[in-house]
Image (cartoon, grey):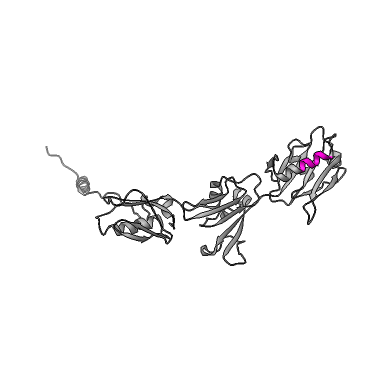
Amino acid sequence: MRLRIHPLVLSGLLAAVSFAQKPVAPPTTTVPVDAPRAADSSPLKDYILGPEDMLSVRVLNAEEVANTPYAIDLLGNLTLPRIGKIHAAGLTLGQLEAELTTRFGEYLQHPLVTVAVSEFHSQPISVLGEVDTPGVHQMKGRKTLFEVISEAGGLKDDAGNSIKITRRKEWGPIPLPNATMDPSGEYSVAEVDIHSVMTAQNPRENISVKPNDVITVPKADLVYVIGAVTKPGGFVLSEKANISILQALSMAEGLQRTAGSGNGKILRTASGSSQRVEIPVNVKNILAGKQPDVPLLANDILFIPSSAAKSASLRALEAIIQTGTGVAIYAHPF
């Protein structure tokens, strides 16, 4: 008995056999021509070399290139065995590696060259003022303003609300709306609002730092509350030009039981003088709403005596504040 196959079924079987015999091409992945190599992913590949940087250079199958640091001289030149002198200042690490690979390619087949910075000396940044470790820091690769502040130990409690940046004109104007040139025309100067950057109101102010930038964090204006209060000390004014007595007492967590609040005093520096004048203030009446609140200005001292306090204790506390010792500083913005 013969098996008969319908012509349509036979046609389908032949098509399936033909498809199975065709080779299947492997899946392809499109890679952009300018896609970076994995070896170039390190941020230090973009570090711009300069005079006095110390480099570690390794060349496979070139034993004369010892594994010891090589210095870029003051003219920006790097001298290596066999290839001699090469101008390295102004090149990135990646560019120097490519140039050395070309140079050693004249003597070696497919040379493998790696370059690393063993000591950074060419891109100093000065961080001054109210940071934990002020001084000259070396910029290792690309850094933002707040990365540099962080590497300097961060801001102190009595840091002001702004950061001043001074930059050499060779790097162009600082990319901030308030940037101006100094009277000499050699430097661009600008300020950054710390509060707006840290609260992400204006993160664009966290600009990139350039070599030889001078970053200055000024000391904040303070109001001091001393005497018979729960938490005496200096309180940062933040972005406000002044606070009131009630606000200051709130930051000082209120009066002690023994406070002679009716005999309070404000010690304020007289205009054009280093001497302070005493301004009597009845804090008791202010708290009771019998008198209007009184504004305190920058560097005012609000003194709340105890009921048995004498004027001598007031002078002693003022001396402590002027020397800057034994006074706690609190950052408490309103």
Magenta span: chief secondary structure? helix
Q: Which residues are magenta?
A: 311-318
Q: Position of residue 30 (x, y in %)?
A: 34, 54
Q: Say whether residue 290 is magenta.
A: no
Q: Is residue 169 above or below residue 135?
A: below
Question: Exactly how many numbered labels are in the figure?
Answer: 0
Does any portion of residue 288 appear in the rendered image?
Answer: no
Q: Quadrant of residue 97?
A: bottom left
Residue positioned most to the top? 257
Quadrant assignment, res 179: bottom right
Q: Nearer the viewer, residue 197 or 174?
A: 174
- Picture coordinates of residue 78 (x, y %)? 37, 58
At x 79%, y 51%, the residue is: 275
In the rendered image, residue 283, in percent from the top left (x then y), is placed at 84, 41
Vertically, is 78 above or below 305?
below
Give the residue drawn at x 54%, y 57%.
213
Is 237 displayed left or right of 256 in the figure? left
Q: Nearer the viewer, residue 84 or 218?
A: 84
Where residue 67 appears, as percent x and y from the top left, is: 34, 48
Q: Nearer the viewer, residue 286 or 181?
A: 181
**Res 169 seen here:** yes
Q: Quadrant of the N terminus?
A: top left
Left or right? Give the position of 289 relative to 176: right
Q: Is 213 positioned to the left or the right of 106 in the image?
A: right
- Residue lying farthest to the right in this orientation: 290
In the figure, 190 relative to 334: above or below? below
